[in-house]
Amino acid sequence: MTTLVIQLWQSCATAPQLAATPFMVAAAAAAMDWSVQIHALGASVELFVRDNPARHHVVEPLKRPLSAYVEDATRAGAKVLLCSTAMRDRNLRPEDMLESCEGVAGMVTMLECLTQADTTVLTY
C-alpha cells in the first residue's frame, strides 16, 4: 500500500492561501485509499490548536475557512502527528489540540515513517 507523508514545515495559519493545498492533497490521496500521514512541524502545529481563531481564516477564492480544509483531510482518513519539540516550544499539551490529531511524535519516529518502503513524502 502506498503511504503519503505530508510534512507541514512552512504551512501556517498566518498564510492561509498557502496552507490549504497540503490538506487538499491529503484528502485526495485518502480518497484514493492511500495511507496518509500529516506531520506538523514548527509553527504548523498551531493549525491544530483547538482554540486558535487563526485556523478559521478564509482562503480565497473559494471563501472557505482554513479549518474546513483540515477537517476534509482528517475526515477522509489522514492521520495527524504533531512534533513534540514544536509542542513543547509553544507550551502546548495534547488536550489543547483538535481531537482529530493522532498524537505527538518525536523526530526519530517521524524519520522512521519517512524512510519506509512505498512512502512518498511531500513537504509544504
Image (spheres, rainbow, N blue to C red):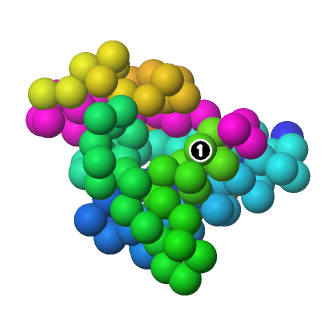
How far from the left and from the top, in percent, is residue 100? 54, 28
Relative to 39, say whether 87 is above or below. Answer: above
Residue 40 within the segment the image draws in magenta: no
Q: Nearer the viewer, residue 102 or 95?
A: 95
Q: How many marks?
A: 1
Q: Which residue is at a point 32% across and 59% down the rendered structure image?
A: 13
Q: Amino acid at mark 1?
A: Glu
How far from the left and from the top, in percent, is residue 11? 37, 62
Q: Nearer the viewer, residue 12 or 89?
A: 12
How far from the left and from the top, in percent, is residue 88? 16, 28
- Asked whether the viewer can see residue 9, the reply is no
Q: Is residue 108 left or right of residue 6?
A: left
Relative to 113, say whether 43 is above or below. Answer: below
- Asked whether the viewer can see residue 8, the reply is yes
Give the SS element for disc 1.
helix
Region rendered in magenta: 75-90
Which image quarter holds the N terminus? top right
Relative to 27, say whether 24 is above or below. Answer: below
* Residue at the extreme front of the image, as rendered: 63
Question: Badge 1 is on which residue?
Answer: 71
Q: Which residue is at a point 12% across and 35% down the rendered structure image?
A: 89
**Residue 50: which quarter of the image?**
top left
How far from the left and from the top, in percent, is residue 101? 49, 29
* Residue at the extreme bottom of the image, as rendered: 61
